[in-house]
Image: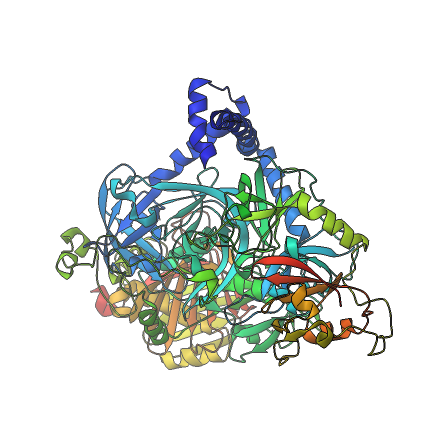
Amino acid sequence: MNRDAKIGWFRLAALRAFAFTVVLLLIGRAAAYEADLGTLTRKAQAAAVKIYGAGGAGLEAYQSGFLVSPDGHIATAWSYVLDVQPIVVLDDGRRMDGTIVGFEPELELAIIKIEASELPYLPLSDTMPEIAEPVLAVSNLFGIASGDEPASVMQGMVAAVTSLDARRGTFKTPYSGPVLILDLVANNPGAAGGVVIDTQGRAIGMLGKELRDASAGVWLNYALPAMKLRPAIADIVAGRTVAEQSQKSVPLPADKSQSLSLLGIGLVPDVLEVTPAFVDRVIAKSPAASADLRPDDLILLIGNTRIESQRMLVDTLRFLDRRDPVVLTVQRDSRIVSIKIQL
Amino acid sequence: MALFVAMPIVSASEPITLDPRVEAAEQARIAAVKRAMPSTVSVFVPGGGGGGSGVLISPDGFALTNFHVSSPAGTYMRCGLSDGRIYDAVIVGIDPVGDLALIRLLGREDFPFAEMADSLKARVGQWCMVIGNPFLLNTNLKPTVSWGILSGVGRYQYPSGTLLEYADCLQTDASINPGNSGGPLYDADGRLLGIVGRASFEKRGRINVGVGYAISIQQAKNFLGDLHSGRIVDHATLGATVASDPDGGVRVSNILDTSDAYRRGLRYGDEILEIDGRSVNTANQVQNVLATFPALWRVRLTYRNDEGLQSTLVRLASVHGQDELLEKMAAALPPPPPAPDPKPEKEEEGGDGEKGDSDPVPIPIPNPHGEPSAEENSEIPEAVNALFQPRRGYANYYVNLQKQTQFIDSLKAQFPGVVSGATHDSWTIEGMTLGDDPKAVKLRVSDQEFELVVGDKTITATKSGELYDGITARNASGVLACLNSWRRMLRDGTDQFGECFYRGSVPLLGERPLRDWMVGVSGELETSWLSHPETKQVEAIEVFADRDDDPVELMIRWGESKSDRPESMEVRYGTDAVLTFKVDQWETENAPEAAQ
């Protein structure tokens, strides 16, 4: 498609989408629509949750999330806030302990489970929204809503559907799929994990973590499309992906199991109760070196097991047979890299 | 962006027909903006010291803005309207805690003004618009319109610094930037919902981040009377602290035994259910309601204790002492506006070293025109000076004097002052108690003697000190203090009564409309007159002997005709009536020497 043809197509799409938006937004003045917008807003707020966890030193200890099942599964952004067991506050003011039941580093997605049932939840859209589709974004940005106050609601539209990795390094995120660019100032502190809904009340996206253009200094307003999150969420909710300890209850004997020294991995000093599994050094010519593990890599997963701390990493290795390969998921700068180490 | 740039080209070459509903909706929006915009004010501090926005609320030029917009200007501002004209404006009253200021535009009696909405009925998701003077762009006096929805209602924002508290405020995603401060938040029909004043800016610099707050117009309505007094007004406190109960509800966690709430029976552990008719379930909600009341308001409180549901009236206290308020206000005054062409803030990588201070702050005052020039600032027009008088504790004492004159004029115009030539040296009132066993009542007040006769019981006093004792003893003779204050105010006027001032407006027995509230202090007694805002008739007179105790209250019930004497009166302490009687006769006599 040449450039002109592209623009022509774009204009047409834009026009169609714009007319659609105008109809939806401006019919507005009729009382019925006001009521609809109010109903839609309430519906989204009812499924929105506030999440409190780790923070401090200039990092907000809160973020947002939304219910994706009636049984208490909550989609949220995978972030430092979840470094401790999170506390979830529901729209009705109930405060509950959350358990992280799954996460997908490449999608910057985590699923938290709370022990409750018959909760209002939002269905996930399985299609990509149209450009100029009107949307509402619901989040606990700036931690404005405290206690039982409902989350904040903002309106706008999908301004573009694009990919962030067109210029690698511009935006520091491990996520490389398509994003919804929003024309509302949605991605504020605490907004990550918030939900973006369409006029049908479907979740069409999840607000991402704050991202700033490394060169221009511009903050991005975007959401991860629900259709990209949907399969991972479905797997986690259905229990097909389990972020739990190995099923075996007894570790292997020391001479049969894996270990850091066998693999050739040295970690940063274990000084905290929950020290992240940052690689400090990789022994030359070791299996880890052959697999191209590098210093400063952060080990996130072994297989499907989430590694929260160095202690957990060491324990997990003790369940693994040293004859099997070790599959690591690590974060290297802003990228997620998969590494297979075979002794 | 490209999409909107491309769009007009398309519509130019291939005209599209809009759905008639779209057309109608668009026209309605245009009409709402047209309706709202004339009441929007662009505020400029003379001499180039910054500025902001405001909104006209009456045809005689009264306009609301933020305290943090009016304070750099002091007494005098220049205000532009969308008709392209500029008017001088004078400060009227300020509420430094609630960040409100009342100013008056001069030169017309037919200013366009905003219709007020009921902000208690505002709901999340409702369309709204902000019209104002962002970045002081309105040099052509055409206000800027931004459109959005209410993102939250009933928000409570913790005090910024030591003073400013935004309670029960409205949160919107309509674009709010420096210069929008003090301006109107309208609903989709162009009615006034609130006064813009605060925003979450944080690390993205001083520009809109989709979160702005407006003081609800409900709160402004509560404070309007106090702002019209020209005073520096304060907010209310219950005299008790509350905590949300983990099992639901909100309970008293501490209470001062000198508070009126304590006197009305509120105790530690009691569950608070309603304040001024609004139900409360959390500590935040309690503060949300309380912080929207001016100091010393009396409101209805419903609570539950071991004995069951209690509904009572509570006099709220002031959050600050007067000196404390003035001190804090001086400390909270915004720093001088930044110099022109400030250096852009240093961009930092990925948020390193940027403090996550998410407290919303008052929107900074933009100042594109440089430092204010002291010389220019001092040139206050004569018309403004004529309407201004400084006094400690006041933003503008001139307006208070005007209110005092209005009060005394209307007091003289109603019974028992209609007797021409009466000097009110003594009053004699006769009547019968109301109830199953009626008794004759006789009251007499003059400078030398005070007498109350009910049936065969007589109470007399010769000194005003004895009136004080009557009030502290909570007996019916307290009525003599009320009547004597009334008599003396009529005879002596505000100049000679004692220290007098117009306080503002307050509910009567917890009910609206808000009554005009005049205060006179004479000796040990402090008297309040509460008058109906339209009929101007005095409906209650309260006399305090001791601020930490109940005053005596005289409720005055008027008949149909304005010139008639009151039909009946009731004497009360707290929530108990101690004497209710029908008025049959009311004689006003002049002293022999005065009569000559």
Residue B522 position in % (x across, y down) = 32, 74
Decide which of B128, B205 is in the foreground and name it: B205
Query: At 73% from the left edge and 74% from the top edge, which residue is drawn?
Result: A262
Viewport quadrant of the N terminus of chain A: top right
Decide which of B108, B17 is in the foreground and name it: B17
Decide which of A286, B52 is in the foreground and name it: A286
Q: Is residue A131 visible?
A: yes
Q: Relative to B2, is B526 above or below?
A: below
B316 relative to B114 in the view: left or right: right
A96 relative to B169 in the view: left or right: right
Q: Relative to A2, is B79 above or below?
A: below
Residue B67 position in % (x across, y down) = 34, 59
Residue B121 position in % (x across, y down) = 55, 47
Q: Relative to A66, is A94 above or below?
A: below
Decide which of B302, B457 is in the foreground and name it: B302
Query: At 45% from the left edge and 37% from the top edge, which residue is drawn?
Result: B1
Residue A86 position in % (x across, y down) = 67, 66
Viewport quadrant of the C terminus of chain A: bottom right
Q: Relative to A129, is A342 above or below?
A: below
Q: How is the image coloured?
A: rainbow
Q: Is residue B360 visible?
A: no
The image quarter containing residue B198 is bottom left
